[in-house]
Every structure is written in C-alpha cells, then in structure tokens.
Image (cartoon, grey):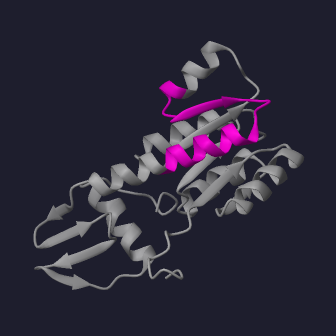
Amino acid sequence: MNARGKKDKEQKTILVIEDDLSLRQGLVMNLKIHGYKVMSAEDGDEGMRMAFETRADLIILDIMLPGFNGLEILEELRQRNESVPVLILSARATTGNKVEGLELGADDYLTKPFELPELLARVKAMLRRAESQLLSSPPISFGDVSIDLAARHVYLRRKAVSLSAKEFDLLCLLAKSPGRVFTRDEI
C-alpha cells in the first residue's frame, strides 16, 4: 500500500536479450531507474533459456545474437503459444526486416540507434496493452475449476484454491493448451 492507501501496481519484469554489453547495461540501468525489475541475457542460448524459465512481462530482443538468433527465439515463443509482448530492438532497419519480425509475432520493432524516451514510451504502451488484454480476458473454466487470469485466483466449485505463483503459472499453461503434451524443458 502507498501513503494514500491505494495498492501499488505490481512491479513489471522485463527480460533484455542483447549481446552488446554497453547497450545491455544501459537498458538494464535505465529500466530499473523507471521502476521495472530487469533480467538480462548476453546471447541467444541464455536468452532462450531465460525466456522459458522466467515469467517476464515483456521481452526486449535483439535479432543478431550469438547462438540462437532473436528471430529463432521469437518463433519458438510463439510456437509454444507464449503471449509475452516482444519488442525487437535491432540494427536491421529495412522494411523487410521489420515485416519479418512483426510477422513472426513481435509486438513492436525499434531500430538502433534509438532515443531512450521513445523506447520507454513503447515499453510502457506495450505493458499497458498487455494488462488491458489480461483484464478483459474471460476466466478459463473446465469442469468445476475456474481460473481468473486478471486476479490470479483459482476456484474449485466456487471456493478459492491457494496456489503458489509457479503452480498458478503451470495450471494456466496447461489450461490454455488442453490436450497438448509439454516436455520438461517447455514447462
């Protein structure tokens, strides 16, 4: 609670996947200054792992990475039905590059060099849209179970069930993809 008695908004988590050390450090520092929790990865392999092991609210993704490139990471995210917003941050500035990234499922594309206020405004807008979509999402129901995504509550026969954050995330993953078999790595 803040001084006025209103509940503070949950701190949003951003995953930055960028191989350029100075740019990555600058992004992490500036995003933290603006109140975000930030994790970072320096290559595509680490970025791919973190994208699936953590629950980021937004991913800032470079395309040209050692290991898995950014487009491979993006494609894998979307194939696994992950809806996390993705902002591509790339030196590839042609229309074809932008179209390719957006068609693979990126939510926005910003070319380097960029102005920090523009990046921060895009991040804020993407998080606002994602939260709005979550709030307007109908509950997921199956059998006697109902999952309120916005409130992060689960009900069994209309009675609240207490779950840890990881248990809730796992239940949502399974409920959003009924009948699908997930590997241990996917979970």
Which residue occupies the extreme right position in the image?
Answer: 22
- Whether 53 is drawn above or below 17: the answer is below
Q: Is residue 68 visible?
A: no
Residue 123 colored magenta? yes
Part of the protein shown in magenta: 102-127
Q: Say above or below: 81 vs 157.
A: above
For this rendering, which residue is in front, 23 or 35? 35
Left or right side of 129 for 30: right
Point out residue 77 in the picture as x, y percentages from the top left corner. Answer: 50, 45
Give the residue drawn at x 69%, y 61%: 39
Whole-percent x, y for residue 95 in the image: 62, 14
- The part of the image, by quadrant, that contains residue 148 is bottom left
- Asked if residue 147 lies left or right of residue 35, the reply is left
Residue 104 rendering spot, x and y as whole percentages: 50, 29
Q: Which residue is depicted at the point 52% across and 62% down?
A: 55
Asked if residue 8 is among those painted magenta in the image, a careful observer would answer: no
Q: Nearer the viewer, residue 4 or 118?
A: 4
Residue 53 is at least partly visible in this image: yes
Q: Viewer-proximal residue, 143 or 184? A: 143
- How many numbered circles does the render carry? 0
Residue at position x 55%, y 19% in the image: 99
